[in-house]
Image: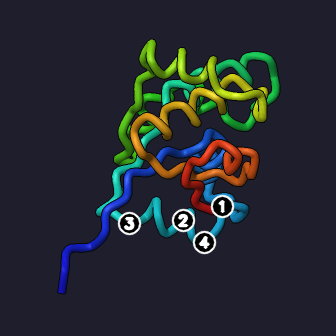
Amino acid sequence: MGRPLTVQVLLDTHAFLWWLGGNLRLSGAARRAIEDNTNTIFVSAASAWEITTKHRIGRLAQAEAVARDVTGSIAGQGFEELAITVDDAARAGRLPGLHRDPFDRVLIAQALARGLAIVSVDRTFDGYGVHRLW
């Protein structure tokens, strides 16, 4: 029998929060990919920025514990942090206008640059040619 196929996965912000909260809206395929300890699961700095920003303005009140310690929340799950590079930012800025959310545009740029699958319910990602798990 061969080695298991490993996948490098980038979590969209909602997928990360849903995973942490045990939210049943997370699809079975997404849950299996995250649970598979042969996969590398990334959480982008863009998600940290989004969580803390939205919590500060009152749009993610339920994410207070995560907003207080995003790094600890990532590490506590055994996930990897994914920094935003200047190339990521420039690539996000050059993407066509299908998606207007700047956080998601960075995630798309990062996934494209690194060949990562994105766990997201957002079908708009499909228009960019990223592999979306859901």
Please state if 130 lies on the left or on the right of 114 as rendered. Answer: right
Look at mark 3 in the image and give the residue it sits on: 36
Q: Which residue is mark 4?
A: 28
Which residue is located at x 60 percent, y 48 percent? 129
Q: Residue at x 41, y 24 (%)?
A: 83
**Distance CA(mark 2)–CA(mark 3):** 9 Å
Q: Label for residue 75?
A: none
> Mark 2 is on which residue type?
Arg
- Pointer 1 residue: 26
At which x and y percent is residue 111? 49, 40
Give the Cα distance between marks 3 and 4. Answer: 12 Å
The answer to whether the residues at label 3 and label 4 have Cβ atoms under 8 Å apart is no
Q: Which residue is mark 2?
A: 31
Which amino acid, by three-letter code, is at mark 4?
Gly
Residue 31, given in percent of the width and then of the height, sits at 54, 65
Mark 1 near mark 2, Cβ–Cβ under 8 Å? Answer: yes
- Residue farthest along the right direction in this orientation: 58
Q: Secondary structure at mark 3?
A: loop
Cα separation between marks 4 and 2: 5 Å
Alpha carbons under labels 3 and 1: distance apart: 15 Å
Whether tag 2 and tag 3 are in contact, CB under 8 A, the answer is no
